[in-house]
Image (cartoon, rainbow, N blue to C red):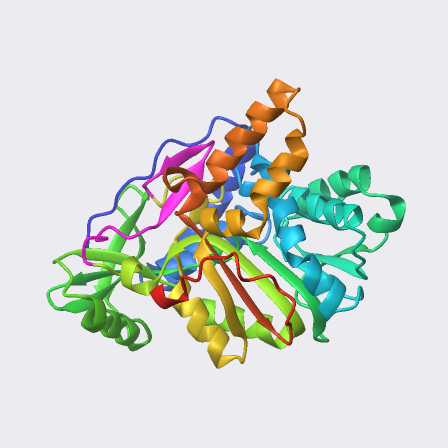
Amino acid sequence: MMPPKPSTNAPDDPVAAAIAEHLQASLKESIAAGDGFLPFLDYMQAALYAPGLGYYVNGAHKLGEGGDFVTAPELSPLFGETLATWLAPVLRDDLGGHGTMLEFGAGSGRLAGDVIATLREQGVDWERYWIIEVSPDLRARQQAHLEATLTPQEYARVAWLDALPDAPVRGVVLANEVLDALPVELFRWREGQVWQVGVTTGVGGDLGLAERPAPPTLAEPVAHLQAEYGPWPEGYLSEWRPAQRAWVGALADCLKQGVAVIVDYGFPRAAYYAPERHQGTLVGYYRQQMIQDPLAHPGLMDLTASVDFTGVAEAAAGAALDVLAYAGQGEFLLGAGLPQRFEARVGSGEDARLTMQAAQAVRMLTLPGEMGERFQMMALGRGCSHLPLTAIPDRRGRL
């Protein structure tokens, strides 16, 4: 067992400090109930989603200025405009203007607003826009933003759900930075075997990381990964996300006809589990800072790990969804019409400030050193023939 590693200083905001204190007390109860060891998967589940205390459900400010991170829709409306333009033929021609749009975790609501405004501009109709959101504060922000930016008729067709609808839909699904927030098992390869990393308490009561031999449910899939992508160096640390396949399967069950676009940071499996990636991808985000200690600020810090896109493709194939496209975010957006949307937004270029802001956003979204390669985009679908794929580089062979 590794010695406990103390977490960082407590937050200065008394409300935030109270949330962290209550969550830590709950975590310590779970650790005690588990004979002194809580698998990291369960810690991450609680840190992000424990009712009233987890990061995504406790009311803490998360997105944009003053929050912990910034997503692509927050950077520029060009992101949502490009996605809407690319998906418009599916809604118009494959679904006849009767499609449902379904968005997972809609952030501040900007992506939904930009998509709907662009479809309005292009004369493409849709029946309803559903948002699945677990965060009460984000749901309130989405409602305020969309009510202020949409027409009353459009806003009346937007609804918020707690889970996937019971009946399958025909439409378009958007999942921007969703899979990375699914909890992961943290594991270490040591002494020729798989060790499960979890959370324990030290003499002073601080939370710390510990290891124990992995149970078969973790040891077997990780051993297969090591056999295929190793040999790994001693002490190799990484993650495995057991809920990913079920998430894709549920998405497939929900999509009777249409396209799902998944945008997230991640890699094909061979790159994810390459020997040189020996410290894994798990990080925290707190007040616009990347935090390496995953136990810092429990309940107040986002925890995230990269996505195994090969696993997404395998799960899709197993659920009878076609992998229609896969590429880095930069090349995907450039092929999906971002340059044309940029020209339409800056017009003649007379407004130098607007042009500079849009150009900076394009660089952030597309350059390899920014979000262009780190983020990947994958389109899954069934029963659609009008999705414009010819300009999208086909990187499916990397999976």
Residue 183: name its quadrant.
bottom left
Residue at point 51% right, 29% down?
360
Q: Residue furthest right?
A: 153
Q: Position of residue 368 (x, y in %)?
A: 38, 42
Q: Position of residue 16 (x, y in %)?
A: 53, 34
Q: Is residue 282 magenta?
A: yes
Rendered position, 249 above or below 361: below
Residue 275: name its quadrant.
bottom left
Residue 27 visible from this viewpoint? yes
Count of numbered tags:
0
- Of residues 215 and 336, the one drawn nearer to the viewer in this rendering: 336
Rendered position, 256 above or below 60: below
Residue at point 62% right, 66% down?
259
Rendered position, 168 above or below 263: below
Q: Is residue 397 left or right of residue 179?
A: left
- Of residues 218 and 259, the one drawn nearer to the viewer in this rendering: 259
Q: Is residue 259 left or right of residue 219?
A: right
Residue 54 visible from this viewpoint? no
Residue 162: name its quadrant.
bottom right
Q: Is residue 196 magenta?
A: no
Q: Position of residue 128 (x, y in %)?
A: 79, 60
The quarter in which the N terminus is drawn is: bottom left
Q: Predominant secondary structure in magenta?
A: loop
The quarter in which the C terminus is drawn is: bottom left
Numbered range of the magenta stretch: 275-293
Q: Is residue 390 left or right of residue 33?
A: right
